[in-house]
Image (tube, rainbow, N blue to C red):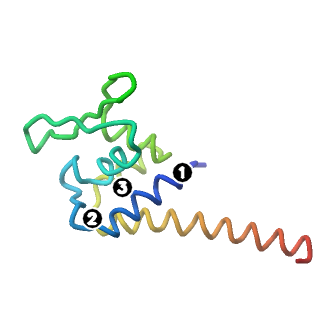
Amino acid sequence: MTTYNIPLIRRVYDHLVRYPIEHNQSSWMTCIAGHTIRIHGEYALLRTGNPLTDGFQSIDFRTGALHDTEELAARLLGMADEEACGLFTCSEQDAIDWLGDINAAYETTILDALAADMMETGS
C-alpha cells in the first residue's frame, strides 16, 4: 500500500488551487513535480536556459547531488513511480483533481477511524 506524504500533497494542492495561473503541466518548472520540489524546500529545480529542459533535474541543497525531477517528486509525495508518471503527465485539471482525491480519501479514512473509535467507546 502506498504511504502518501499527505502534508506535502496538501501544500501542493492548496498552492495550485490558490494560484492556478502558476500551474502548467507542460513545463517541469510549473508542473506538479516542479511545484512539489519547490514547496518541499530542500531542493531546487535546475535551469538550463532551454524551456524544454529547464527543471528536468533538481539539486539537493545539502549535498549538491543531482536528481531526476520526476523520480524525486514521486519519492517526496510518497507515490509509486507509475502513479507519479500518470500524475505528472495528465492535464492541469486532472492533476488537481488527482491530488484532491488523495486528500479526500485520506480524510475519509481518518473520519471512519474516528467514528469506529467512538462506536467502540460509546462516545
SS for dot 2: helix
Q: Tell me which amino acid carries mark 3.
A: Leu
Q: Would you say the residues marked 3 and 2 are in contact, meaning their CB atoms lie under 8 Å apart?
A: no
Residue drawn at 42 percent across, 51 percent down: 83
Position above or below: 73 against 88: above
Residue holding disc 1: 4
Q: Which tag, 1 or 2, sits closer to the chain's start? A: 1
Quote the CA–CA distance across marks 3 and 2. 9 Å
Q: Where is residue 121 in the image (x, y as percent from the top left)?
A: 91, 71
What separation in Å lies between label 3 and label 1 (alpha carbons)?
A: 14 Å
What mark, if any, has residue 12 been given in the picture?
none
- Residue at position x 50%, y 62% from top? 102
Q: Residue 32's image quarter?
A: bottom left
Which residue type carries mark 2? Glu
Q: Are marks 3 and 1 in contact (CB under 8 Å)?
A: no
Q: Is residue 51 left or right of residue 116?
A: left
Earlier sequence position, callout 3 versus callout 2? 3
Q: State the image quarter where residue 25 is shown.
A: bottom left
Q: Mark 2 points at which residue?
A: 92
Few, some or many residues within 10 Å of mark 3 (<14, 14–19, 20+)? many
